[in-house]
Image (cartoon, helix red, strand yellow):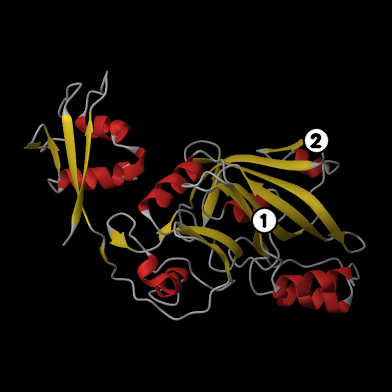
Amino acid sequence: MSSTSVSFVIAADPPPRLDKAIARDVPEAAALSRTRLARLLADGAVTVDGVVAEDPKARVREGAVIDVLVEAAVESHIAPEDIPLDVVFEDSDLIVANKPAGMVVHPAPGSPSGTLVNALMHHCGDDLSGVGGMKRPGIVHRIDKDTSGLLVVAKTDAAHHGLAAQFAAHTVERYYRALVYGVPDANDPRLRGVKGTSFEPGNVLKLTTQLARHKTDRQRQAVLFQGGRHAVTRARLVARYGTPEVIAQVECWLETGRTHQIRVHMAHAGHGLVGDPVYGGRRKLAKGALSDAATAAVQAFSRQALHAAVLGFVHPVSGEMLRFEAPIPEDLADLIAALTN
């Protein structure tokens, strides 16, 4: 198996631990993440002044010469599958795809095949140089199986490292379109009493809570105000439907990116997503508020009405600002048309 060696010198004032020092000083061009470096350290692939490093907690001096032996990427256990892909953008570093509703992003025990990653393995073929030591696409974010829309996937370690840093820093632009029950409006006194909600100029609903896995239902997330992980969602009204108004189209954007974040936040605010099977996407509508056709369309919608419509980020290699938009998919467009008519 071929390999490459990455050599560098520990700079001034090194951190007290070897693993932290090499993570700080490894050349950015090597695109070795902290996780990858930790694995290489454990595998005996790191030497300090010619001696194999055995203790990641050991001290290291300024000027020490570090050599990291990086083996060529190995073949992945994930099988390529010839599944059609809607590719929005692709170059040698990354690929942006418009995922259809119903497709899982990554293989898991309940979904071992038919996933976006299986499709990407086939589509990219030998164009994958490897992520984390394995020839596979680098998933840096996900959207739920029954949410449609845009994802960016890394094809190289460098791209994976750079994209992951942007997601961690919350600098990636992500806008979603959703249909929700009720109308989130600053004039609604009920919303003013919901903990974690506030309004910003322009009638923008802001939801600020902690999120964690539900104590009794492991498939759900729950809103907390102590513990869990910090989560912030914003939502802006796009359209209202019904007389009285019973459905709204909203544009949501994420300051953080937690599992089910928009779905659980909107449900917490009392504006659950139409069709959402987990967070209460079936509600009785006021009689006569919508036409019979629109009411039937709402009741028949079989997934959460959520679409990842906009994705913007800095290209992790070229530095170019990229921004992509995916049109609303046919099923959601048909539902909006029924509500509008």
User: Which residue reaches farthest bottom?
Assistant: 82
Mark 2 nearby-residue class (10 Å; few <14, some 14–19, many ≥20): few
**Disc 1 + disc 2, Cβ < 8 Å:** no
The vertical placement of 141 against 53, above or below, is below
Q: Quadrant of residue 130 in the image?
A: bottom left
The structure residue drawn at horizontal position 34% and vertical position 56%, both measured from the top left corner, is 131
Query: Three-letter amino acid code at disc 1?
Result: Tyr
The vertical placement of 93 against 122, above or below, is above
Measured from the top left, where is residue 280 in percent x and y? 65, 63
In-image side of 56 versus 210 (left or right) = left
Measured from the top left, where is residue 75 in percent x and y? 26, 68
Measured from the top left, where is residue 205 in percent x and y? 74, 43
User: Which residue reaches farthest top?
Assistant: 13
Q: Give the camera-side residue of 135 and 333.
A: 135
Q: Which residue is mark 1?
A: 176
Can residue 204 be seen here? The reply is: yes
Quarter occupied by the C terminus: bottom right
Q: Give the camera-side residue of 94 and 261.
A: 94
The structure residue drawn at horizontal position 15% and vertical position 46%, both measured from the top left corner, is 45
Q: Which residue is mark 2?
A: 201
Mark 1 nearby-residue class (10 Å; few <14, some 14–19, many ≥20): many
Q: CA distance from mark 1 to mark 2?
A: 19 Å
The structure residue drawn at horizontal position 20% and vertical position 21%, both measured from the top left corner, is 62
Q: Quadrant of residue 191 in the image?
A: top right
Measured from the top left, where is residue 92 in percent x and y? 45, 60
Can residue 183 be seen here? The reply is: no
Secondary structure beneath disc 1? strand
Quarter occupied by the N terminus: bottom left
Q: Give the camera-side residue of 271 and 234.
A: 234
